[in-house]
Image: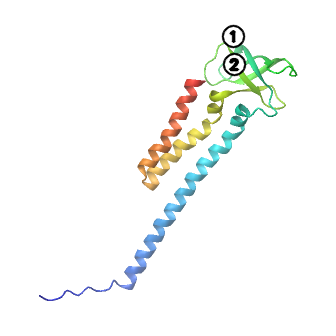
Amino acid sequence: MPATRQSKPSRSRRIGQSAFGALLLMRLVLLLAVVALLVAAGGWSSWGDVRNALEPDGRERGTLSLQECDREECTGSFTPDSDGGETQESATLEQPIGREAGDTLSVALRPGTTEAVRTGLGGALYGALPLAGALILAGIVIAGGLRWFRTAWITAGVGIVMMASTILLW
């Protein structure tokens, strides 16, 4: 039985394989950078509202009795929880999800304004909506570009659960 001789791959073939490997690595790094940028931008834009909803430092907390509501905002009177705070005749709450006049909500005022932000888990999730959207977009990039389907489902699923929880708790 004659021995089969295996030839060494040509130099040009080895260079081509190395270049293809480098392109695959560059694609991986670029798409991971896009995913990181999406999630970081969502977290950055969410941080201001989440901080106002959760941190008690420097924010006047109280209840907002809604008097007038339209499609974009509700207006009402703010009553502070602490004795040192002053009652404000008019405070506004951004209103994307239906509320009616007469509702009473726990809120915190943004420092130096009459804009109110919902407190608690519902307010924090509402403030984190940009992050939830960024997670859904990152899931699409992970699935389409990186072909990491399980990771993509988990990432997008977390974003969808955050959005659904926001609607249920608002």
Whole-Å distance between the Cαs marked 2 and 1? 10 Å
- Left/right of residue 138 with respect to residue 121 in the rendered view: left
The kind of residue on which mark 1 rests is: Gly
- Left/right of residue 24 with respect to residue 119 in the rendered view: left
Q: Quadrant of residue 94?
A: top right
Residue farthest to the left?
1
Crowdedness of circle 1 by 10 Å Cα count: few (<14), some, many (20+)? few
Q: Which mark is residue 39?
A: none
Q: Circle 2 sits on which residue?
A: 105
Q: Indicate the position of residue 109 as horizontal and vertical percent values.
A: 78, 27
Q: Which mark is residue 102?
A: 1
On screen, 51 above or below 19? above
Q: Quadrant of residue 57?
A: top right
Q: Indicate the position of residue 49 as horizontal and vertical percent values.
A: 70, 35
Residue farthest to the front?
83
Q: Residue at x 32, y 86 (%)?
A: 8
Q: Residue at x 66, y 23 (%)?
A: 95
The kind of residue on which mark 2 rests is: Leu
Does the CB distance between marks 2 and 1 fall below 8 Å? no
Disc 2 vs disc 1: which is toward the camera?
A: 2
Q: Indicate the position of residue 165 as horizontal and vertical percent values.
A: 55, 29
On screen, 33 above or below 3? above
Q: Residue at x 74, y 18 (%)?
A: 64
Residue farthest to the top?
102
